[in-house]
């Protein structure tokens, strides 16, 4: 029942998405048809000049009525639409009564087609039938020709309705697809921003925090008047960390471009820099760029945390190639003071959260917490 009371879609009523060629053809047909109708009235010698002028005014009024009918149907106002349609049909009857047969027939035909095309079916069918019936009953036709023509007018209106509905639905689906693509693009942009934010944190925060530790130690040594060699050692270490940070920045740029960097070499070098013991297990194989980047960043974050919270503690770095994943385990044997809140609040701050996010994005897991008098970070990611 809802289909009988439902209006055509707004896209169908407004002509949204109508091809330009079709739009030009429709406008051209309207202009040509109106011109022929005006010419027919203007050259009809059976009327006086003033009568022709009155008829032309009546034809213009019918045209304005059709235009108003189209406007109110766009707003889906059934009462005004039926009123305007009744006015058009009455105008056709009046024109027929005074002998202006052609304008009257055109008014009835336009009314029959427009009613079926633009109104809810519950109102369109009877209104279109009345308009077509006015044409059939007044114009002289055969016993079969008249009803066939009337049914043909209703069928033409319904065909236009179906065509406009199909086009409107296609246009609506296209708009929805465009909106979905736009939302998808925005989501991808936000994901890329989050990824770049992690890269900035992983590279700059680690490098700068390490330099800050060494420079702060150098400042304290200077204030206490310690040996110059000890101060120089801290400055050299800060310089080494600056160089390391620059190298990491280059590696991050390579990873963002999708280029792979040997993970084992990075881990071995990082472990040597921190004085940690490094061991590897399993058959080496090439890793995806994102997987390798996750391993490097987690190793960097974990080693930085050891340097900050357990300086001088023995550190072990273990990297294992397993059947469907890789395992990175970084364990230190130094006691550290962990603030309340569990592993996420051990001083790494956004770093541990960032590591977990990186692992989860790849379908992996990250465990971080106290173990055997020290602290362990364990990463598993598919590979």
Image: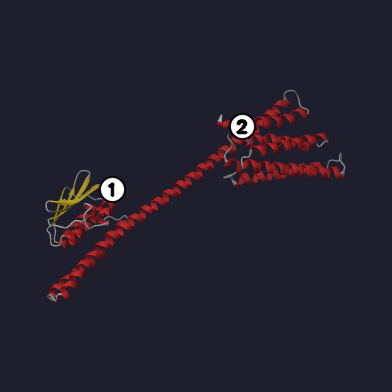
Can you see residue 288? Answer: no
Q: At numbered mark 1, what does the secondary structure look like: helix, strand or loop?
A: helix
Task: Count neighbours of disc 1 (C-alpha within 10 A) and say few if under 14, some if 14 to 19, many if 20 or more.
Answer: some
Q: Nearer the viewer, residue 316 or 142?
A: 316
Q: Which residue is mark 1?
A: 360
Can you see residue 359? Answer: yes
| Outermost top residue | 143
Q: Which residue is mark 2?
A: 121
| Outermost front residue | 340
Count of numbered badges drawn on the protein: 2
Quadrant occupied by the N terminus: top right
Q: At numbered mark 2, what does the secondary structure look like: helix, strand or loop?
A: helix
Query: With 374 as the anchor, is 249 left or right in this view?
Result: right
Q: Position of residue 186 (x, y in %)?
A: 42, 52
Q: Quadrant of residue 308?
A: bottom left
Q: Nearer the viewer, residue 195 or 29?
A: 195
Q: Nearer the viewer, residue 8 or 145?
A: 8
Residue at horizontal 72%, vertical 29%? 133
Looking at the image, residue 145 lies above or below residue 325: above
Q: Quadrant of residue 250?
A: bottom left
Q: Position of residue 104 (x, y in %)?
A: 77, 36
What coloring was used for the rendering? Answer: secondary structure
Q: Position of residue 55 (x, y in %)?
A: 81, 42
Q: Earlier in the sequence, mark 2 or mark 1?
A: 2
């Amino acid at each position: 029942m809802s289909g009988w009371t439902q209006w055509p879609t707004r896209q169908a009523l407004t002509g949204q998405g109508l091809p330009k060629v079709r739009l030009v053809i429709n406008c051209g047909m309207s202009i040509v048809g109106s011109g022929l109708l005006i010419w027919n009235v203007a050259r009809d010698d059976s009327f006086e000049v003033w009568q022709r002028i009155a008829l032309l005014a009546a034809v213009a009024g019918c045209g304005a009525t059709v235009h108003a009918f189209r406007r109110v149907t766009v707003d889906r106002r059934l009462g005004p639409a039926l009123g305007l349609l009744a006015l058009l049909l009455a105008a056709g009857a009046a024109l027929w009564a005074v002998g202006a047969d052609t304008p009257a027939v055109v008014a009835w035909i336009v009314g029959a087609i427009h009613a079926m095309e633009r109104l809810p079916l519950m109102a369109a069918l009877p209104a279109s039938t009345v308009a077509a019936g006015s044409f059939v009953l007044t114009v002289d036709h055969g016993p079969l020709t008249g009803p066939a023509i009337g049914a043909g007018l209703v069928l033409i209106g319904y065909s236009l309705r179906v065509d406009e509905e199909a086009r409107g639905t296609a246009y609506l689906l296209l708009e929805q697809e465009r909106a979905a693509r736009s939302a998808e693009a925005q989501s991808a942009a936000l994901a890329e921003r989050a990824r770049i934010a992690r890269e900035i944190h992983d590279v700059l925060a680690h490098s700068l925090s390490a330099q800050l530790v060494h420079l702060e130690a150098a400042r304290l040594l200077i204030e206490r008047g310690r040996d110059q060699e000890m101060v120089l050692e801290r400055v050299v270490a800060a310089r080494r960390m600056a160089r390391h940070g620059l190298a990491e920045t280059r590696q991050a740029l390579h990873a963002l471009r999708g280029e792979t960097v040997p993970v084992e070499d990075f881990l071995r070098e990082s472990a040597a820099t921190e004085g940690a013991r490094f061991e590897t297990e399993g058959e080496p194989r090439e890793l995806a760029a994102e997987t390798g980047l996750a391993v490097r960043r987690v190793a960097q974050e974990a080693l930085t945390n050891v340097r900050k919270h357990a300086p001088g503690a023995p550190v072990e770095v273990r990297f294992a190639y397993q059947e469907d994943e890789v395992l990175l385990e970084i364990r230190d044997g130094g006691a550290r003071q962990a603030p309340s809140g569990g592993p996420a609040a051990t001083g790494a701050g956004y770093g541990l959260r960032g590591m977990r996010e990186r692992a989860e994005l790849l379908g992996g897991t990250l465990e971080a917490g106290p173990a055997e008098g020290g602290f362990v970070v364990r990463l598993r990611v598919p590979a």
